[in-house]
Image (spheres, rainbow, N blue to C red):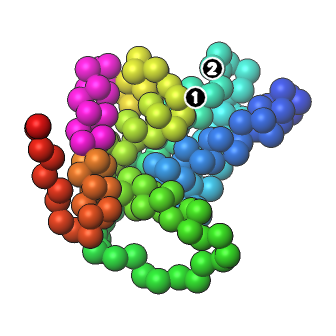
Amino acid sequence: MLTADPAYSEFVEARGPRLRRAAYLLCGDADLAEDLLQEALIALAEKWESVDNPDGFVRRVIYRKRVSWWRKTRREVAVERMPERGTPDGADDRARDDEVHTALRALPPRQRAALVLRYFEDLTEAQTAEVMGVRPGTVKSLSHHAIARLREELGTRATGGVQEKESLG
């Protein structure tokens, strides 16, 4: 049974945009993110009275549903360049954000989830581990490898595909 508690509506209103952003960063698709969030919010409404930490509950449902979808579709098609699309004025200001989002989407699902939960959702390692169902050490390892891959990917793009060598002078 869904809840009629006004506190639930207040929670959805207050936290919805941030949770939608987290879902988007996990999957890289606005429509899919909306679906993930809606399913998580329905699950929360069904258990509202018994949930102590609604934020954590919704994040956990979003993450687990996304993992389930990853397992079903397992193969993402990587493309060297994203298809061109029209950009509004001021797109230069967002170019770096687009680069970061593209590099984030290129990460393996678990690494992407660790980064989104830790750095975009600002969860602790313990909270991230709880949401992902892994140990905190795994979160550290996933985050470390993901950050290294992002640095490599973003460094490659910044230099036009040529890796710069640092001198140790």
Considering only vertical position in the picture, is 27 above or below 61?
A: below
Q: Which residue is drawn at the image coordinates 77% and 32% (left, top)?
A: 11
Q: Secondary structure at mark 1?
A: helix
Rendered-image quadrant of the C terminus: top left
Report the residue that reaches farthest toward the front.
Answer: 169
Residue 32 appears at what percent x and percent y?
A: 54, 60
Say whether marks 2 and 1 touch (CB < 8 Å): yes
Q: In the drawing, does residue 18 fall left or right of residue 22? A: right
Q: In the drawing, does residue 132 fall left or right of residue 122? A: left
**Residue 27 seen by the camera:** yes
Q: Amino acid at mark 2?
A: Asn
Rendered-image quadrant of the N terminus: top right
Look at the magenta stretch and give its main secondary structure.
helix
Q: Amino acid at mark 1?
A: Phe
**Residue 74 seen by the camera:** no
Q: Which residue is drawn at the image coordinates 32% and 62% (left, top)?
A: 158
Residue 96 appears at what percent x and percent y?
A: 48, 59
**Front position in the image: 147 or 37:** 147
Residue where numbered disc 2 is placed: 53
Residue 149 appears at what percent x and percent y?
A: 25, 48
**Front position in the image: 17 or 85:** 85
Q: Which residue is drawn at the image coordinates 43% and 55% (left, top)?
A: 100
Q: Which residues are magenta?
A: 134-148
